[in-house]
Image (spheres, grey):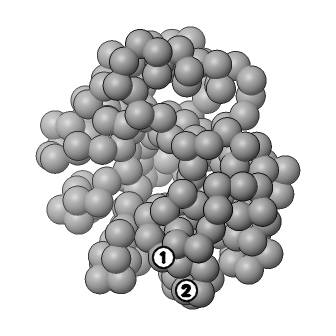
Amino acid sequence: MNIPEIYEENPIIAAVKDDATLRCAIDSPCRTIFLLYGNICDISQKVELVKNAGKLAIVHTDLIDGLENRDVAVKFIRETTKADGIISTRSIIIKAAREYGLIGIQRFFLIDSMALDNARKHIEQGIPDVIEILPALATKAIATLRAEYSIPIIAGGLISDKEDVINALSSGASAISTTRQDIWSL
């Protein structure tokens, strides 16, 4: 799966936190949906809805009720769903995703220079396939990481309008993720 090509066609990712927005995301032009909610009893059905719509399904394992932050959570997602990948803040989860043939998106909250150095460390270890930087408004940090590494970057968090999307993409992000439905159709 060529991730950069996917986001060249449509760099907006629908991030959903409930069933109502999941239905809207499925009907949107977004090619990728981040599932930021659910539990071990219903995540398979949510992924199936996304896949049946012909979209990529990425599960944020840290936010799924009933999953522990251990590699067995990734095995569970791989064996019980048709998810294309996972998101996590934890390197062990991202490493497991790659071992199980799933896209591994590591989420970093860039709140200070130590967090930026931590992101560099994980990128240099070759752990994530893609990184997600929050908040997306950290355009200088996105530009810095983009200049230093060839790994795709997704910018998420605090996107409120088209200008924020343009700024994040202009700074070097390959795509943006947002829960804002009005941005999904940009």
Q: Residue at x 41, y 34 (%)?
A: 109
- Contact between labelled residues 2 and 1, with CB atoms less than 8 Å apart: yes
On the image, which quarter does residue 168 sit in? top left
Judge whether residue 155 can be spotted in this image: yes
**Residue 74 at x, y = what percent?**
73, 61
Badge 2 marks a residue whose secondary structure is loop
In the displayed structure, 18 sits above or below 97; it is: below
- Left/right of residue 14 with respect to residue 47 in the rendered view: left
Amino acid type shown at disc 1? Gly
Q: Which residue is mark 1?
A: 38
Q: How far is mark 1 from mark 2, CA to CA? A: 6 Å
In the displayed structure, 76 sits above or below 113; it is: below
How many numbered marks have been drawn onto this rendered protein structure?
2
Q: Nearer the viewer, residue 184 or 22?
A: 22
Q: Residues within 10 Å of mark 2 (few under 14, many from 20)?
A: few
- Left/right of residue 36 with respect to residue 179 in the rendered view: right
On the image, which quarter does residue 175 sit in? top left
**Residue 142 at x, y = what percent?**
41, 23
**Residue 111 at x, y = what percent?**
35, 25
Q: Nearer the viewer, residue 179 or 122?
A: 122
Q: Which residue is mark 2?
A: 42
- Left/right of residue 152 with respect to residue 171 in the rendered view: right
Amino acid type shown at disc 2? Asp
